[in-house]
Image: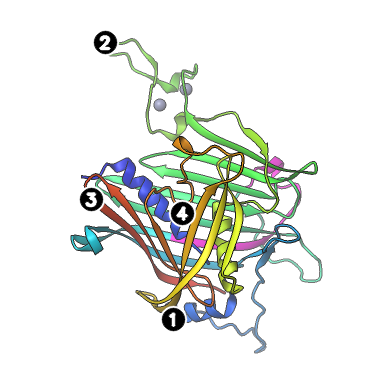
Amino acid sequence: MFQTPLFAQILACAGFACTGLTLARPALARLAAIAVARPAADGPHGAAAAPRSPLVVTRGPDALAFEIPAAEVLDFDVFVELGLLGKLGKFRVGSFELSSGVEPFQAGLPPAGIVTAALASEPVASFAPVPRAGWMRGRARGRYLGFVLDHTIETRVLPQAWPRFVHRDTAAGSACRRRELRYGDRDGVNSLWYRSDTHCKGCERREHFVDASLFSPAGHCRRCRRSAHRVWKAPRTRTIPTGAVDMLSAVFLCRAMVAEGRDELTFPLLDKDTIWELGVKRAGRQRIETSAGTFTCRAIVLSPRAAEGEPRGGKAQFKGLFGIHGTLSIWVEEASGIPVRIEGTVPVGPLDLVVSLELRSTESP
Ligand SMILES: [Zn+2]
Ligand SMILES: [Zn+2]
């Protein structure tokens, strides 16, 4: 049988995976037309209403920029396949949603790097140049063998030097944890700030105490899954190379690579406070069928390696991108880079467990 934490990890990873790759208007429109009924794009006078434009995120003078679509939602089904080629069965265990948006940004709000989802979303007068912020979000939800997963990763890109990127990784459900990564140009130095939470160890708060029993006096809870018992650890900071991105931004960067017709790309990837060098290659062409339609796709191959001077082996094994140790395959729509199918193989005891994400529907303006 599966061990639930591992399964959760797999699903979460799958979530990351799914954050796979994505981009490009015309192809996206094609996908959207196939998958969902869309509202008419014409305005009240018959003129085409200008869709809100994507946010272009630059990464330095010689580095490939990527785009954050202004309003996009990609929905995936998450399946678990048992046995070789799923011969023992394929089960839907959850969903994954990859979405993005662009909003006006008010400097000074929110305070000191604390970014909330409640940033102003009202349209603003078009004649005033308003700085814009972009966000990308991946949310995996599932339930299997009594284990509940609700895992969200989100990156906000702000029109300011520090922090320019705020990346959050939040797991709710049966296993809770939070991580936060901020990076950008801090006082002229390309920097990273990272913190994660942990179960509170022995504070004085009486509400963290568990009742006395026959065998022990009342004392602080030793271990539990309550989010209220979690506290932030001290943040860590370091310098990072130019053009480095977090995992979710990497997905959109890979998408830009495919949309630009590039065959490969290498860039520094930030996972917690570790730096990896991620090589991405575009491989063979294949027709992929999902419930959203049939797509001409290219396979994407990811090869991470420890960046120079970073720890190797042992605990430093790469699993940040998808959380899984197995192989990973991603198929993206050829013209747009939109991920259509993501598949990871994970050995669990004597079984090969295959987790796959398949595009179910898309929405765009
Ligand atoms: Zn406590
Ligand atoms: Zn506790």
N-terminal of the two: label 3 or label 2? 2
As displayed, is residue 351 above or below residue 338? above
Residue appearing at x 32%, y 13% in the figure? 212
Residue appearing at x 44%, y 51% in the figure? 322
Pointer 3 and pointer 2: residues touching (CB < 8 Å)? Answer: no
Residue hosting label 3: 351
Residue 219 placement (x, y as % from top left): 39, 14
N-terminal of the two: label 4 or label 2? 4
Judge left or right: residue 86 versus residue 361. left
Q: Amino acid at mark 1?
A: Ile
Pointer 2 local density, CA inside 10 Å: few below 14, some 14–19, many at least 20? few
Residue hosting label 2: 215
- Element assignment for label 3: strand
Q: Amino acid at mark 2?
A: Phe
**Tag of residue 16:** 4
Residue 61 placement (x, y as % from top left): 76, 60
- Element assignment for label 2: loop
Region in magenta: 97-115
Residue appearing at x 33%, y 43% in the figure? 6
- Element assignment for label 4: helix
Pointer 1 and pointer 4: residues touching (CB < 8 Å)? Answer: no
